[in-house]
Image: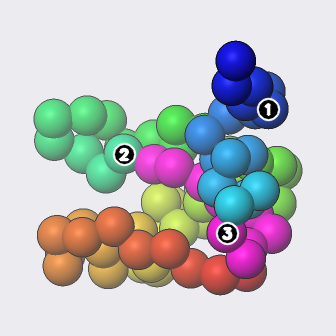
Amino acid sequence: MLEFPAFTSLCDWFVSKLPIHHAAISTLGDPFELTTVGASDAIAAELEGMQLDLGVGPCWEAKAAGTPVLVPT
């Protein structure tokens, strides 16, 4: 039987699989609200909150381009 490690969030999975230290997932409006859905830790949550408040950063660039963006930290 396959065994999968338990992750408390999708962000934790990304941090474990990619060469990054922090991860966050946000929605950017229609049809959802502008909000952070999850974060791997307090640093990721703070950075994501700042990005949403300021309206600039990688998630806004991804929205404009229509593609997801992973930013190594």
Q: Is residue 25 left or right of residue 72?
A: left
- What is the spatial separation of the Cα atoms under label 2 and label 3, in whole angstroms? 21 Å
Q: Which mark is residue 27?
A: 2
Image location of residue 11, percent across then percent down: 65, 47
Crowd class of label 1 (few under 14; some 14 to 19; many from 20; radius 10 Å): few
Residue that numbered label 1 is attached to = 5
At 16% from the left and 35% from the top, the residue drawn is 31
Image location of residue 46, percent across then percent down: 73, 58
**Residue type pointed to by label 3:** Leu
In the depicted structure, whether residue 18 falls above or below residue 58:
above
Observer-side mark, 1 or 3, equals 1
In the depicted structure, whether residue 16 falls above or below residue 40:
below
- What is the spatial separation of the Cα atoms under label 1 and label 2, in whole angstroms? 26 Å
Image location of residue 66, percent across then percent down: 17, 70
At 65% from the left and 81% from the top, the residue drawn is 72
Observer-side mark, 2 or 3, equals 3
In the depicted structure, whether residue 49 falls above or below residue 57:
above
Residue that numbered label 3 is attached to = 18
